[in-house]
Image: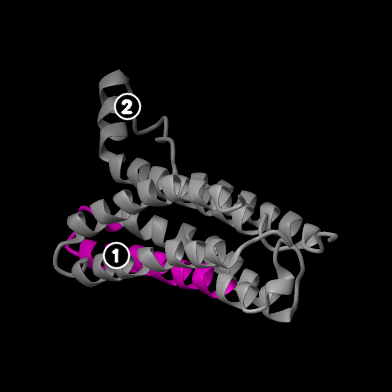
Amino acid sequence: MEKETIRIEGFSDAVFAIAITLLVLELHAPDVTVVKNGTELLAFLKSEWTAYLAFTLSFFSIFIMWVNHHKIFKQIYSRNTAIMFANGLILFLVTAVSYPTTLLARFFESEASNIAVAIYTGIFVLINISYNLLWLVASKNKNLLRPEITDLAIRKIRNNYLYGLPTYLIAFGISFQYPTIALIINMLLLIYWAVSSGKINMNQE
Protein backbone atom coordinates (compact mmCIF):
# COMPACT_ATOMS: atom_id res chain seq x y z
CA MET A 1 0.00 0.00 0.00
CA GLU A 2 1.48 3.33 -1.07
CA LYS A 3 1.76 5.99 1.61
CA GLU A 4 -0.26 9.09 0.69
CA THR A 5 0.62 11.35 3.63
CA ILE A 6 4.16 12.40 2.68
CA ARG A 7 3.17 15.98 1.81
CA ILE A 8 1.13 16.34 4.99
CA GLU A 9 4.06 15.12 7.08
CA GLY A 10 6.55 17.40 5.31
CA PHE A 11 4.34 20.46 5.77
CA SER A 12 3.71 19.54 9.41
CA ASP A 13 7.43 19.14 10.11
CA ALA A 14 8.02 22.66 8.78
CA VAL A 15 5.29 24.11 11.01
CA PHE A 16 6.66 22.34 14.08
CA ALA A 17 10.13 23.68 13.27
CA ILE A 18 8.84 27.25 12.97
CA ALA A 19 6.80 26.96 16.18
CA ILE A 20 9.76 25.70 18.18
CA THR A 21 11.99 28.44 16.76
CA LEU A 22 9.52 31.20 17.73
CA LEU A 23 9.98 30.31 21.39
CA VAL A 24 13.52 31.64 21.53
CA LEU A 25 12.35 35.13 20.58
CA GLU A 26 11.14 35.64 24.15
CA LEU A 27 14.66 35.22 25.53
CA HIS A 28 16.23 38.67 25.77
CA ALA A 29 19.82 39.73 26.47
CA PRO A 30 20.26 42.78 28.75
CA ASP A 31 21.10 46.19 27.36
CA VAL A 32 24.80 47.03 27.69
CA THR A 33 23.85 50.49 28.96
CA VAL A 34 22.02 48.94 31.91
CA VAL A 35 24.31 46.05 32.87
CA LYS A 36 27.79 47.31 33.71
CA ASN A 37 29.55 44.33 35.28
CA GLY A 38 29.40 40.61 35.93
CA THR A 39 27.44 40.97 39.16
CA GLU A 40 24.70 42.94 37.43
CA LEU A 41 24.67 40.45 34.56
CA LEU A 42 24.21 37.54 36.97
CA ALA A 43 21.42 39.43 38.74
CA PHE A 44 19.69 40.03 35.41
CA LEU A 45 20.00 36.38 34.39
CA LYS A 46 18.56 35.25 37.73
CA SER A 47 15.63 37.63 37.33
CA GLU A 48 14.82 36.02 33.98
CA TRP A 49 14.42 32.50 35.38
CA THR A 50 10.71 32.35 34.51
CA ALA A 51 11.56 33.02 30.86
CA TYR A 52 14.05 30.13 30.88
CA LEU A 53 11.51 27.86 32.58
CA ALA A 54 8.75 28.72 30.11
CA PHE A 55 11.09 28.29 27.14
CA THR A 56 12.32 24.90 28.35
CA LEU A 57 8.83 23.58 29.08
CA SER A 58 7.44 24.73 25.75
CA PHE A 59 10.47 23.57 23.75
CA PHE A 60 10.24 20.02 25.04
CA SER A 61 6.43 20.07 24.82
CA ILE A 62 6.56 20.91 21.12
CA PHE A 63 9.43 18.48 20.54
CA ILE A 64 7.51 15.61 22.16
CA MET A 65 4.38 16.62 20.24
CA TRP A 66 6.42 16.37 17.04
CA VAL A 67 7.70 12.91 18.03
CA ASN A 68 4.14 11.71 18.70
CA HIS A 69 2.88 13.33 15.49
CA HIS A 70 5.60 11.53 13.53
CA LYS A 71 4.71 8.19 15.11
CA ILE A 72 0.98 8.62 14.51
CA PHE A 73 1.66 9.22 10.83
CA LYS A 74 3.73 6.06 10.68
CA GLN A 75 0.35 4.36 11.26
CA ILE A 76 -1.66 6.56 8.85
CA TYR A 77 -1.08 5.64 5.21
CA SER A 78 -3.93 7.39 3.42
CA ARG A 79 -5.61 10.77 3.83
CA ASN A 80 -9.06 12.26 3.59
CA THR A 81 -10.47 15.71 4.25
CA ALA A 82 -11.17 14.98 7.92
CA ILE A 83 -7.56 13.92 8.53
CA MET A 84 -6.23 17.03 6.83
CA PHE A 85 -8.42 19.35 8.90
CA ALA A 86 -7.71 17.50 12.16
CA ASN A 87 -4.01 17.77 11.41
CA GLY A 88 -4.48 21.45 10.58
CA LEU A 89 -6.03 21.99 14.02
CA ILE A 90 -2.95 20.45 15.65
CA LEU A 91 -0.66 22.74 13.65
CA PHE A 92 -2.76 25.81 14.51
CA LEU A 93 -2.52 25.06 18.22
CA VAL A 94 1.19 24.23 18.04
CA THR A 95 1.97 27.60 16.49
CA ALA A 96 -0.11 29.27 19.24
CA VAL A 97 2.06 27.82 22.04
CA SER A 98 4.50 30.75 21.87
CA TYR A 99 1.88 33.21 23.16
CA PRO A 100 0.97 31.43 26.43
CA THR A 101 4.69 30.77 26.83
CA THR A 102 5.25 34.54 26.80
CA LEU A 103 2.46 35.06 29.33
CA LEU A 104 3.93 32.40 31.61
CA ALA A 105 7.40 33.95 31.41
CA ARG A 106 6.15 37.45 32.22
CA PHE A 107 3.47 36.80 34.82
CA PHE A 108 4.40 33.61 36.69
CA GLU A 109 5.83 35.59 39.61
CA SER A 110 2.99 38.13 39.65
CA GLU A 111 -0.53 38.19 41.09
CA ALA A 112 -1.74 37.15 37.64
CA SER A 113 0.17 33.85 37.74
CA ASN A 114 -3.03 31.81 38.03
CA ILE A 115 -4.44 33.24 34.80
CA ALA A 116 -1.10 32.88 32.99
CA VAL A 117 -0.81 29.24 34.05
CA ALA A 118 -4.49 28.58 33.24
CA ILE A 119 -3.97 29.86 29.69
CA TYR A 120 -0.75 27.84 29.41
CA THR A 121 -2.34 24.59 30.61
CA GLY A 122 -5.47 25.34 28.60
CA ILE A 123 -3.59 25.33 25.30
CA PHE A 124 -2.35 21.81 26.07
CA VAL A 125 -5.87 20.64 26.88
CA LEU A 126 -6.84 21.74 23.37
CA ILE A 127 -3.74 20.14 21.84
CA ASN A 128 -4.52 16.83 23.54
CA ILE A 129 -8.09 16.99 22.23
CA SER A 130 -6.76 17.67 18.72
CA TYR A 131 -4.49 14.59 18.85
CA ASN A 132 -7.43 12.50 20.02
CA LEU A 133 -9.48 13.91 17.15
CA LEU A 134 -6.79 13.09 14.58
CA TRP A 135 -6.58 9.47 15.69
CA LEU A 136 -10.38 9.20 15.92
CA VAL A 137 -10.97 10.31 12.33
CA ALA A 138 -8.06 8.21 11.05
CA SER A 139 -8.99 5.00 12.88
CA LYS A 140 -12.69 5.17 11.97
CA ASN A 141 -11.72 3.81 8.56
CA LYS A 142 -9.12 1.08 8.88
CA ASN A 143 -8.37 1.38 5.16
CA LEU A 144 -6.62 4.68 5.95
CA LEU A 145 -4.13 2.98 8.26
CA ARG A 146 -1.04 0.83 7.87
CA PRO A 147 -2.27 -2.46 6.35
CA GLU A 148 -0.76 -4.68 9.07
CA ILE A 149 -2.14 -2.73 12.06
CA THR A 150 -4.36 -4.73 14.39
CA ASP A 151 -7.57 -3.69 16.16
CA LEU A 152 -5.74 -4.09 19.47
CA ALA A 153 -3.03 -1.66 18.35
CA ILE A 154 -5.67 0.85 17.25
CA ARG A 155 -7.30 0.71 20.69
CA LYS A 156 -3.96 1.01 22.49
CA ILE A 157 -3.05 4.16 20.58
CA ARG A 158 -6.52 5.61 21.20
CA ASN A 159 -6.30 4.89 24.93
CA ASN A 160 -2.78 6.30 25.12
CA TYR A 161 -4.04 9.74 24.09
CA LEU A 162 -7.30 9.53 26.03
CA TYR A 163 -5.47 8.85 29.30
CA GLY A 164 -3.74 12.22 29.16
CA LEU A 165 -6.92 14.29 28.78
CA PRO A 166 -8.29 13.99 32.36
CA THR A 167 -4.89 14.96 33.79
CA TYR A 168 -4.68 18.03 31.56
CA LEU A 169 -8.19 19.00 32.67
CA ILE A 170 -7.21 18.60 36.32
CA ALA A 171 -4.13 20.79 35.77
CA PHE A 172 -6.27 23.41 34.07
CA GLY A 173 -8.90 23.31 36.82
CA ILE A 174 -6.50 23.74 39.74
CA SER A 175 -4.35 26.35 37.98
CA PHE A 176 -6.73 29.09 39.10
CA GLN A 177 -5.96 28.33 42.77
CA TYR A 178 -2.65 26.44 42.68
CA PRO A 179 -0.72 27.55 39.58
CA THR A 180 2.59 26.04 40.69
CA ILE A 181 1.04 22.60 41.22
CA ALA A 182 -0.69 22.85 37.83
CA LEU A 183 2.65 23.61 36.17
CA ILE A 184 4.28 20.64 37.92
CA ILE A 185 1.50 18.40 36.57
CA ASN A 186 2.27 19.74 33.11
CA MET A 187 5.92 18.81 33.62
CA LEU A 188 4.95 15.29 34.69
CA LEU A 189 2.78 14.96 31.59
CA LEU A 190 5.85 15.76 29.49
CA ILE A 191 7.53 12.71 30.98
CA TYR A 192 4.39 10.65 30.34
CA TRP A 193 4.27 11.63 26.66
CA ALA A 194 8.00 11.02 26.24
CA VAL A 195 7.65 7.50 27.65
CA SER A 196 4.31 6.67 26.01
CA SER A 197 5.54 7.69 22.56
CA GLY A 198 7.54 4.47 22.57
CA LYS A 199 4.31 2.50 22.92
CA ILE A 200 3.20 3.73 19.51
CA ASN A 201 6.32 2.13 18.02
CA MET A 202 5.61 -1.12 19.84
CA ASN A 203 2.09 -1.08 18.46
CA GLN A 204 3.54 -1.62 15.01
CA GLU A 205 4.12 -5.26 15.85
Type of amino acid at the residue the image marks with label 2: Leu
Q: Mark on residue 36?
A: none
Residue name at image x 24 percent, y 51 percent: 184
Determine whether the residue tagged by mark 1 lies in a helix, strand or loop.
helix
Q: Main secondary structure of the magenta part?
A: helix
- Image-based side of 8 in relation to 28, left or right: right
Type of amino acid at the residue the image marks with label 1: Thr
Residue that numbered label 1 is attached to = 167
Corner quadrant of residue 87: bottom right
Q: Position of residue 71 (x, y in %)?
A: 61, 52
Residue name at image x 43 percent, y 35 percent: 29
Viewer can see residue 110: yes
Determine whether the residue tagged by mark 2 lies in a helix, strand or loop.
helix
Q: Position of residue 40 (x, y in %)?
A: 27, 26
| Closer to the camera in the image, 182 or 73 | 73
* Magenta range: 107-134
| Closer to the camera in the image, 38 or 72 | 72
Residue 35 in magenta stretch:
no
Q: Position of residue 53 (x, y in %)?
A: 33, 43
Residue that sits furthest to the top in the current view: 38
Viewer can see residue 118: no
Residue that numbered label 2 is attached to = 41
Eye-nearest disc, 2 or 1: 1
